[in-house]
Image: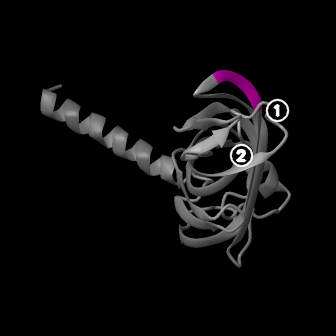
Amino acid sequence: MKIKQFFIVIMFFVFAGNAYAQFGKNCELRQVKINLLNPGLEYEMALGTNTTLDVKAGIQVALDPLLPDVYSEFGVFPAVAAQYRYYYNFEKRQRKRKQIYGNSANYVAPAVAVFFPGSRTIANENIEGAFGYAGLVTGIQRSFDSGFNFSVDVGAAYYDGQFEGGIYPVANLSIGFIISEKRWCVGR
């Protein structure tokens, strides 16, 4: 077989595989959400059959690892967060005739976040600079035809910054509306 024919055969299989894969997606291709509880924007896009990348930017409630007692009070900081979500129960929800629109399913996700608290005084010391975490969460997301959307996840993460790093809990709650979407969801 000549190189040109070989190249054409390979390209045919690549395009045929991609076309088949597109019909196997459970996730929405992309959706933009407004988060009302932690004011900000969220963008979620499909990466695979059951996987998405979810990126958030806005104001977020978080632990402040610089406080002597981390759990004594929460801070409210500008933040950017991301999760690589794997939704593991689309098929089960479809079998039970439950909606999967808007990625309504349960997920596990590696999660990262960076907080930008600005300058603040803790124990009579002026502190500046960002801090962040990387960890693992599990959660649920539900979306409704009206566009109303919520997700909640919990897990643990390693926090690091201008302090001795440590493992602390992570909990996220998002309540808002889908304002833009590119639907693909087969379980409508």
- Residue 132: x and y, percent? 59, 35
Q: Is residue 179 above or below residue 86?
A: below
Residue stretch rendered in magenta on the structure: 164-168
Nearer to the camera, 127 or 87: 127
What's the residue at 21%, 30% (across, down)?
6
**Residue that extends furthest to the front in the rendered view of this protein:** 124
Q: Are marks 1 and 2 in contact (CB under 8 Å)?
A: no
Tell me: 9 left or right of 146: left
Q: Quadrant of the C terminus?
A: bottom right
Question: Horizontal and vertical percent for residue 182?
Answer: 51, 67
* Spatial CA span between label 1 and label 2: 14 Å
Q: Nearer the viewer, residue 3 or 175?
A: 175
Residue 23 in magenta stretch? no
Position of 10 compared to 124: left or right? left
Q: Residue 164 falls in which quadrant of the image?
A: top right
What label does residue 161 carry, if any?
none
The residue at which mark 1 appears reads as 69
Q: Quadrant of the N terminus?
A: top left
Foreground residue among 151 and 35:
35
- Residue 16 position, x and y percent, is 39, 46
- Amino acid beneath label 2: Ala
Name the residue at 57% across, 49% down.
79
**Residue 44 visible, this orientation:** yes
Query: Label 1's element?
Result: loop
Kindly give the residue lying farthest to the bottom in the view shown.
146
According to the picture, the residue beneath numbered tag 2 turns out to be 62
Q: Examine the rendering and report whether any part of residue 89 can be seen.
A: no
Amino acid at the residue labelled 1: Asp
